[in-house]
Image (cartoon, helix red, strand yellow):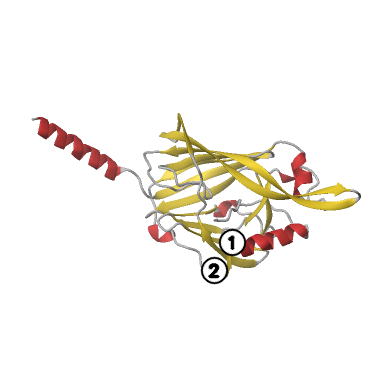
Amino acid sequence: MKTIITTAVSLLLAIAVNAQQKEGKVIYEYSNKYKGASVSSSISSGGAVSSVNALQAPPQKYELLFGNNKMTWNKKEEDQRPEGNAGGMVISSGAVSMFGNKQDDVLFCDFGTGEEIRQKDLFDQMYIVQGHISKFNWKMVGETKTILNHVCQKATTKAINMRTQTTMKDGNMVKSEVADTTTITAWYATDIPVQAAPEVYGQLPGLVLQLEKNSPYAISTYTATEVSDKLNLAAIKAPAKGKKVTAEEMEKLMKQMMENNGPIKHGIPMRFGN
């Protein structure tokens, strides 16, 4: 009798595991709140941004597709900005980074191989940036909350972002590299056992349904508003349109644009694999 009960329990557990969602689509709403006017002086010595209010934007929507241990991430087509805002510098949680505002800007991650590929439309020039998924040292906090009827666990980590700061010294403009620490908080659903998440902040034992990045300058948040199991797996594929460059080459291009006081636009934050 005991053997029969044990076998039945094992069978039920196996059925429950197999029934867990491992592919689907998530829609996120993104918001960004700046903490103070100091962000302006930290971006550019050329006064490219005159006030914090000029950087505020209405909530934006992003789409995450996941399945077969892979994911793609991009901005919703209906939420794309006008063609004139094709791409450029981005202010993301106090750090100047780069991605873009068009639907053609796509992030692809293969968690099995650790490969990360980004398609980037930068000032009407398409690039394919190849790299590796960044690793984070997540700390499990032990707190829970419910998001869209999914019980989520809390995890935190920290990221270091480098920025260029310009100051006056003895009547001369001096540039220096400054490290800013961003605290990242993720809420992941253990009943959806995939590593996918907004941007590249995943690799947790469950789908991230809410992600908050708290930097010295701003708090940005992605919150899931819809989770669906309806998905065409063929849609999860690496982008291939554009000039292939390494993460280091794109980083160099970004710095050149910053030094030239290039345009500052809103868009999907971009990180590069190590």
Res 91 visible: no
Mark number displayed over residue 183: none
Give the residue displayed 37% in from the left and 44% down from the top. Answer: 193
Q: Are marks 1 and 2 in contact (CB under 8 Å)?
A: no
Name the residue nearer the viewer: 3 or 82. 3
Name the residue nearer the viewer: 259 or 124. 259
Horizontal side of residue 95 vs 38, given as left or right: left
Residue 31 place in picture, x, y as percent: 61, 41
Q: SS of the residue at dot 2?
A: loop
Q: Amino acid at mark 2?
A: Lys
Q: SS of the residue at dot 1?
A: helix
Give the residue displayed 74% in from the left and 42% down from the top. Answer: 39
Q: Give the vertical position of 263 relative to 145 (above or below).
A: below
Horizontal side of residue 225 vs 39, given as left or right: left
Name, please, the residue furthest toward the front.
170
Res 223 visible: yes
Instruction: State which quarter of the image contains the C terminus.
Output: bottom right
Mark number displayed over residue 241: 2
Name the residue nearer the viewer: 13 or 184. 184
Q: Give the vertical position of 32 relative to 164 (above or below).
A: above
Name, please, the residue furthest toward the bottom.
243
Give the residue displayed 27% in from the left and 40% down from the top. Answer: 16
Name, please, the residue furthest toward the right.
171
Q: Which residue is mark 1?
A: 247
Q: Earlier in the sequence, mark 1 or mark 2?
A: 2
